[in-house]
Image (cartoon, rainbow, N blue to C red):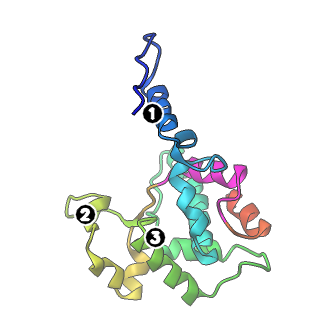
Amino acid sequence: REKLAEPTTPDETFESILLQSLASMGASHAGTDENVSCPRLSFMGNLSGPQVALVFSARRILTRDDSITSQGKIPNPLTLSRLLKDYQSYTGSSNRYKRETLLRAFTQLLEMDVFRPSSDHSGAGPLQYGGNRAVYELDSHTLKNLPLHFPYSKEEVTDTMKSDNTFVCSTALRDWGLKTN
């Protein structure tokens, strides 16, 4: 094993030491594909078209919610109903999906922790349902109105959408996903 170099200046950061360590193990920059702008989102290249559409809807909604929050108002929680309503504004001819397909994609995203049920009034947070499959088997009305937590920042999603081809979708869907209205 190679010995890592000791920090030589007080300005050397944890990040540079981590990168040095990864390089010594033969890993690429930050341990991910160099073409991916956000390593946390690299797995999203494996998402299906309907799943990508729902992620883009979440980004659009959260971006609009920020402008509502900046006005001192409290936005409605992110829910499947809001995601589906937002997706209806997509007018492209490719990547059009039926409601049933989007519902199935949503439950798959829940299982993958792309969306998490947000805190209810029990005092626990978004991780309270970890390992509890019962939340994925809720009736459709409850599922559509369940407050959601999206554990990725909209900036991460936007940067990834702009800089690489992580999300496999049509250009029309990507362009729609980058808009907020």
**Secondary structure of the residue carrying numbered label 2:** helix
Q: Is-magenta flag for residue 83?
A: no
Range shown magenta: 152-167
Residue 52 lies, with reference to residue 153, above or below; the image says below
Reading the image, the residue beneath label 2 is 128
Say which of 19 and 169 sits in front: 19
Name the residue rendered at 71%, 78% in the picture. Answer: 95
Front of the two marks 2 and 3: 2
Q: Amino acid at mark 2?
A: Gln
* Marking on residue 79: 3
Q: Position of residue 154 (x, y in %)?
A: 56, 52
Separation (CA) of disc 1 from disc 3: 41 Å
Q: Amino acid at mark 3?
A: Thr
Say which of 114 and 19 sits in front: 19
- Residue 96 appears in view: yes
Front of the two marks 1 and 3: 1
Reading the image, the residue beneath label 1 is 21
Say which of 133 and 89 sits in front: 133
* Marking on residue 150: none
Number of residues whose C-alpha sits closer than 10 Å to that of mark 1, classed few (under 14), some (14–19) or many (20 or more): some
Q: Earlier in the sequence, mark 1 or mark 3?
A: 1
Name the residue rendered at 22%, 59% in the picture. Answer: 124
**Secondary structure of the residue carrying numbered label 1:** helix
Q: Earlier in the sequence, mark 2 or mark 1?
A: 1
Q: Earlier in the sequence, mark 2 or mark 3?
A: 3
Q: Residue furthest top?
A: 9
Drawn side of residue 132 relative to residue 87, left or right: left
Q: Amino acid at mark 1?
A: Ser
Name the residue rendered at 78%, 75% in the picture. Answer: 92
Residue 165 lies, with reference to residue 136, above or below; the image says above
Q: Is-magenta flag for residue 166?
A: yes
